[in-house]
Image (tube, coloured by chain):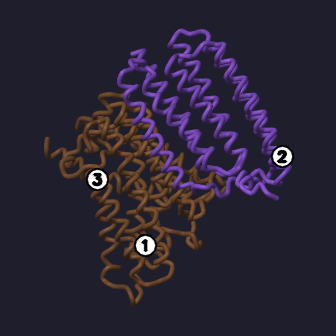
Amino acid sequence: MVITGYVLEIAQVILALLLAPGLAGFVRWLKARLQNRRGAPPWQPYFELRKLFGKEVVMSNNASWLFRIAPYIIFASTITVTLLVPMIVAPLALDGMGDLLMVVYLLLLGTFFLALAGLDPGTAFGGMGASREMTVAAIAEPTIALAIFGLALSAGSTNLGRIVTQELANTAVTLSPGHILAFVALFIVTLAETGRLPVDNPATHLELTMIHEAMILEYSGRYLALIEWASWLKLTIFFTLLSNLFVPWGIATTFDPAALAVAVIALIVKLAVLGGIIAVVETRVAKLRLFRVPELLGASFVLALLAVTSSFVLK
Amino acid sequence: MNDALFSQLTTLGSSVILLYGFTLLWRKSLHAYTVAFQWQSVMLTGLFLIIGYFGHDVELYLVAGFLFILKVLILPRYLGKLEQRFPGERESRPYVNVATSLVVAGLLVLLAYAITRPLVLVSDLPTRGGLPLAVGLIFVGLFVIITRKKALTQIVGFLVMENGIALLAVLGTYGIPLIIELGVFLDVLMGFLVMQVFVYHIHDTFESIDVDQLNELRH
């Protein structure tokens, strides 16, 4: 039984790794269709990865060892997060390893090294991107923690697996105002953290306001592939948090193969629905001026704060 | 079960109403304020209907009808007309900037939770979960009136505050007597019309609806 748990953990990581490029491609494709373009097929990111892994790495002479190891750290920290987030099965074998604080800080570790790597070669764009990313992250990270704390308060545990099982046991709680406020807050933060539209434009390389693209401008070959893969994985992780923490139905609570199959399908459907929502949002809104981004994130922080308050008072 | 559903619905409705109050702090165009107020009033009407249904009070349906006519149909239409009279007026530089006012508003709601806590503890109404939110909405409306410069924004702030009072009344008492409710509606309408006249006068005198200029009354 213990072994099955660990096997499932590995399976979950592989599933996340396989799904992540597909999700990113699906969002791109749907967005293109909504904008009356034909768009690349949803599986395009897989080809991109294969191409990038096949290419040689070109590096600036000024780049240090930090620049070389940063992609591995980013990729590894993101993968570790997938071990802790309940994707297909609720009480995870590695639940004891870390809770939501661990998840938040692992994600922040990746962001931190990405910003360092952006600064390292000493290009103008890299430094700009890094400073912007840190501005966004400084407001976004506490909001993530606070929003999930709102859920943790009603579940009585900061453990993500426990939160999901508690919610499945007591479904009425999913419609409480605390949960809905926390969902909205986490949704806004997801847009900011994964570099989606009102905050950052994922579709362009050549814009003075880019954040994520500015930091990875110097990367090529397998390093770029790892970073891109990690950022798609981050999108998948945030979508999984949004779907499984707030709408936990479909997730397996036993190691029964039929339940697991249902859970995988439910996960894919939930990710597709959220991807559709993101595509619609990105088509409808314009990019915010950089100086208005803290206002948006401030609003989401206030929502998260209210979520925690109302969960605490109504407990 | 019925009671649990009722209390969940009212708390949820109150949260949504409070969130519409928050959009006043985040948006800058007068049109967005009007739309936010209109939707807030729609939600408030819905909440009146829910409380009327679960509290078995037929009078509340009537009040909800009046509320819908006044706050969803008449007032937004007048606000829209005002907006067209003064195109291009935006709340571009409030006394307190957007990010700070959002945080302050969050703190105000926390304050509302703190001061209504004794009330919520002794009350056994199913609607008690929404009481702090209603008080919070009153605070937020007041905060909008204090910190915004345009006369129109302040009017919307007043109307939102009035929505908060109506919300508090209906959550706390399941509806005050119809005659008082009618009096309040009439007051709101009269207050709004008087303020509208004032806005026209301010605009005639200063060629702007920025009330900051009232500080320099000497010509």
In percent of the image, x 26 and y 35: which residue is there? A253
Same-chain check, marks 2 and 3:
no
Secondary structure under the numbered disc 3 in the rendered image: helix
How far apart in space, not on screen, are marks 2 and 3 (Cα)? 53 Å
Marks 1 & 3 on one chain: yes
Disc 2 and disc 3 in contact, CB within 8 angstroms: no
The residue singled out by tag 1 in the image is: A52
Chain assigned purple: B
Q: Residue at x 63, y 14 (%)?
A: B61
Residue at 46% across / 53% down in the picture? A189
Residue found 39% across the figure and 26% down from its top:
B120
- Give the chain letter at badge 2: B
User: Circle 3 sits on which residue?
Assistant: A101
Above or below, comparing residue B46 to residue B62 in the picture: below
Residue type, numbered disc 1: Leu
**Circle 2/circle 1 CB separation < 8 Å:** no
Q: Is residue A124 visible?
A: yes
Disc number for residue B85: 2
Q: Give the quadrant of the N terminus of chain A.
A: top left
Task: Residue B204 in the image: state x and y as whole percent.
Answer: 86, 49
- What's under tag 3, amino acid-wise? Leu
> Is the residue marked by circle 2 packed among few (<14), some (14-19), or many (20+) residues within 10 Å?
few
Q: What's the chain of the residue with tag 1? A: A
Whole-percent x, y for residue B190 in the image: 76, 28
